[in-house]
Image: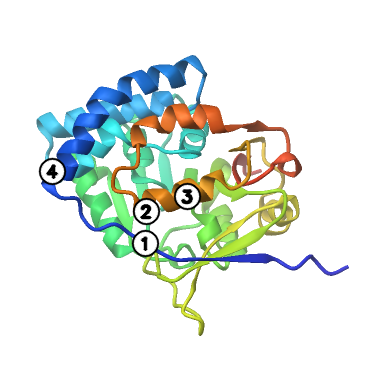
Amino acid sequence: MNPPEVKRTYLKSSRLGPPTPFQMAALALAGLLLVPPYWLLAWLRGVPGLQVRWNCVRLGVRLLLRRQGPIDLKTILILILYPLDSTRHFELDFAWRALANEPIGKYLDISSPRIFFTLLLLQQKAMKAELINPDKADLAETRKMLQAAGLLERCGLHDCLVADAPLNPASFDVITCISVVEHIPEDRQAIQKLWELLKPGGRLLLTVPCAAQTSEQYIDRDEFHVLEPGKDGYVFMQRFYDARLLQERIFSITGPPRRQAIYGERAPGLFLRMATRKRTDRYYPFWREPYMTSLEYTEFDSLEALPGEGAVAMEFIKP
């Protein structure tokens, strides 16, 4: 039986230019006034990720007061006021709860949001890290943050694809890959490489976007400076995993996860509308994100129960 045809969606990019000093001041003032009450409302509703947000605030204040390298004020303000949005609350919370309080020796991260492994390095004083990110510009920003936080000497940075990583097999205690695999066309090859790099008994923390039925998104610009556009001018952006695709692309290599959780929008279309608005509205109310997440997203028991988009977080143990 042939698999069902994969639905494709084509997106138009619409990135905002750098904010003016007035715009930065307005967003900072609004954040200082409005983030605390919306944070309280989110806490009362039990939204995940607030501990990670608080750790981001502490990191931002640390960089503001005693940074050990150059880092721009905008990055610090984002850390303090607007570090997470939508399903990032869930994804980073899942990984943080799994890793923060258990000692880690050798750690590898594959292009996850830089705030996660920066916080983990601060928490895990003895941990040595290797970071892979083929987006050279983004990796340069990661280098700045790690240097400013005094963590760069504990990290090896690699601007390459996962498949080309110059790392020894079976050498890592923990590997994290948060919302990355879905952007890799040859995702099964990437998972195979990660599994080979993990030690026996090691843990892989992986999150990907999901839906009741798989689909793919294409966009009219190379968001990550890695892929070439097709003849139509569009570049592969990401895929949404359904139960069949998880089994074929991931579980067939790793086996079933030891733990799995699913978090998604209550009504279809919300995530796409909000993502589009964030790219086009200079004054998008980021201060509402924790509370909005508590209202519009929830946990689900299965991928088949998702009405729209979601994220699935998984923890694997290598035999």
Query: Mark 2: few, some, or many residues within 10 Å (few <14, many ≥20)?
Result: some
Mark number, residue 279: 2
Q: Residue furthest right?
A: 1
Counting from the top left corner in percent of width and height, residue 298 is at 60, 31
- Report whether residue 214 is seen: yes
Rendered residue at 72%/48% (across/down)? 212
**Secondary element at image label 1:** loop
Task: Using the numbered discs, state the Cα–Cα distance from disc 2 to disc 4 in whole angstroms.
Answer: 19 Å
For residue 227, which quarter of the picture?
A: bottom left
Q: Which residue is mark 4?
A: 22
| Kind of residue sitting beneath label 3 | Ser
Of residues 305 and 198, which is closer to you in this image?
A: 305
Q: Amino acid at mark 2?
A: Arg
Q: Is residue 95 found left or right of 1 in the rendered image?
A: left
Q: Secondary structure at mark 3?
A: loop
Separation of residues labelled 2 and 1 (CA atoms)? 6 Å
Q: Considering the image in quadrants, where does the N terminus appear? A: bottom right
Name the residue that disc number 3 marks: 171
* Residue 178 visible in rendering: no
In front: label 1 or label 3:
1
Residue drawn at the location 72% of the way across and 55% of the way down: 252
Q: Disc 4 residue type?
A: Phe
Q: Residue at x 33, y 27 (%)?
A: 55
Q: Which residue is mark 1?
A: 14
Sequence-wise, the earlier of marks 3 and 2 is 3
CA separation in Å, label 4 and label 3: 49 Å
Image quadrant holding the C terminus, namely top right
* Front residue of this view, candidates 259 and 58: 58
| First in sequence: mark 2 vs mark 1 | 1
Q: Earlier in the sequence, mark 1 or mark 3?
A: 1
Horizontally, residue 191 falls left or right of residue 124, namely: right
The reply to whether discs 1 and 3 touch (Cβ–Cβ < 8 Å) is no
